[in-house]
Image (cartoon, helix red, strand yellow):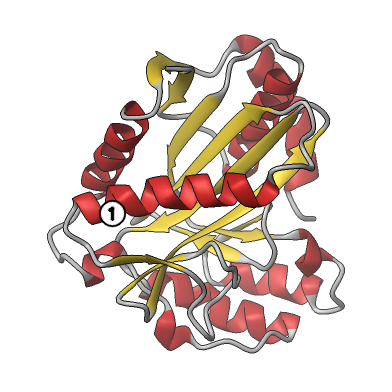
Amino acid sequence: MATLQIIRSLTGGPAHLDTAAARAVLEGVAAERLAATFILTRATRVVAFGRQDTVRSGYPGAVASSREAGFEPVERLAGGRAAVFHEHAFSFSLATPEAESRTGIADRFDAITALLSEAFTSLGLDSRIGLVPGEYCPGDSSINLFGTRKVMGVGQRLIKGAAHVGGVIVVDRPDLVNLPLIPVYRGLGYEWDPGVTGALTDGDPGLTIADAEDAIIAALGRRFDLEPATLDPVSLERATVLAPEHAPR
């Protein structure tokens, strides 16, 4: 099996520095300095804005609304509309070397959603792949429970020589997703339905972040030879340079 590095935490700093660190890892993979790398990171309260958000006239007000709700605004690597991270959720990302990164986009989405849905199913959840009408940050590669409650979103970032596939998994407290998103989406002019925001605990109230992380690591272990790793000094130094690009002013 191919080797996959596993990083269980990044900088321990603010969210925009962690975002920059994931970008630095992607660059390291593209440069063949790093092997393919999977990152799991516990979340803090963040609204992660996508590129399409940043060009809308309501963006400055949406950033202000995020801060007023107690959530740090960050401009993320991948994905479309704003999504939310909080202490009952965690992020994931997979950076892989790709000779032609613009080919295989759909295959990479299919592979990561199949893996994560398998992990959630192993926990006894009714995990399904696909968009729920009205969901925040809508996408065909979202994962939901019961066909009605979005629990995971995913996006993709491409650079020459590598691809990053990453997103957020909400384990509990879906209300904390809606808390900042209601004013943020109002400011950005997006129509959506907060009622379809879900969490893994909708399927099993006793589930924890550790349970979900362990299930994902087990699913990865059936596909790869896993190698524990930490953020290397070169990537950390690069992250400090990149970090201001991911912190909205």
Q: Nearer the viewer, residue 46 or 191?
A: 191
What number of labels is visible? 1
Point out residue 55 in the picture as x, y percentages from the top left corner. 87, 68
Asked if residue 77 can be seen in this view, the reply is no
Q: Nearer the viewer, residue 177 or 132?
A: 132
Point out residue 7 in the picture as x, y percentages from the top left corner. 45, 25
Check disc 1: other Cα within 10 Å, few if <14, some if 14-19, many if 20+.
many
Q: Which residue is mark 1?
A: 120
Among all residues in the image, which is located at the extreme left? 206
The residue lying at 59 percent from left, 15 percent from top is 35
Asked if residue 25 can be seen in this view, the reply is yes
* Horizontal arrangement in the rendering, residue 114 relative to residue 125 (left or right): right
What is the secondary structure assignment of the residue under circle 1? Answer: helix
Q: Quadrant of residue 225?
A: top left
Which amino acid does the dot numbered 1 rest on?
Phe
* Quadrant of image for the C terminus: bottom right
The residue lying at 44 percent from left, 38 percent from top is 41
Q: Nearer the viewer, residue 216 or 86?
A: 216
* Horizontal arrangement in the rendering, residue 237 relative to residue 54 (left or right): left
* Horizontal arrangement in the rendering, residue 26 relative to residue 221 (left or right): right
